[in-house]
Image: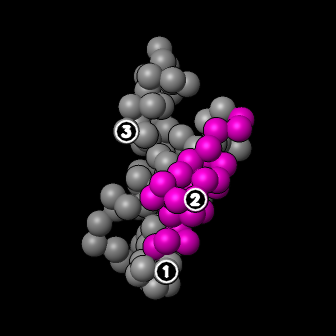
Amino acid sequence: RNSNELESGPYMRKSADYAWQLFFVALSIIFLSIPLSPSTFISPFLLALIYMTSSLAPVGAQANLFGLVSFPVKYYPYVILALDFLMGGPMAESGRSVGVSPGHTLMN
């Protein structure tokens, strides 16, 4: 869903830019994850996509957490990290937090 929003929104007719950004994110996650020796890289990659989507969202956009709590979309990746920490502990959060830094590097 997040990738579709990026492709049909800010990166419409900029497929090469989007592909290079995804390539950069993938390589960054692989190299940053070496000390953690993860079994999969999909969680950090999805978090990087969520970070990119939330940083390109219009000002004032809101997100809902289970339909109970509303907050600005720009905080969505950090809410997901907090939920990972609460449900899986520090190791689950540390493996996924690797995706925030490439997303932040690309968007700033």
| Distance from Cα at disc 3 to Cα at disc 1 | 25 Å
Residue at the disc numbered 2:
69
> Which quarter of the figure is the N terminus placed in?
top left
Question: Between residues 35 and 86, which one lies in front from this camera angle?
Answer: 86
Q: Considering the numbered disc 3 on the image, is that residue within a helix, a strand or a loop? A: loop
Q: Is residue 43 visible?
A: yes
Q: Of 100 and 70, which appears nearest the observer?
A: 70
Residue tagged by mark 3?
1
Residue depicted at x 46% and y 85% = 89
- Measured as percent of width and height from the top left, residue 51 is found at 55, 49
Whichever of callouts 2 and 1 sits on the residue coming sooner in the sequence is 2
Q: Residue at x 48, y 18 (%)?
A: 12
CA–CA distance between discs 2 and 1? 17 Å
From the viewer's perspective, is 58 left or right of 40? right
Q: Nearer the viewer, residue 68 or 15?
A: 68
Estimate the x, y position of residue 64 in percent, counting from the top left.
53, 52
Residue wearing tag 1: 86
The residue stretch that appears in magenta: 59-84
Examine the structure image and report whether residue 60 is included in the region drawn in magenta: yes
Out of 73 and 7, give the one closest to the viewer. Answer: 73
Spatial distance from mark 2 to mark 3, Cα to Cα?
21 Å
Question: Which mark's residue is nearer the viewer, 2 or 1?
Answer: 2
Secondary element under disc 2, as helix, strand or loop, is: strand
- The three-letter amino acid code for the residue at tag 3 is Arg
Q: Quadrant of the C terminus?
A: top right
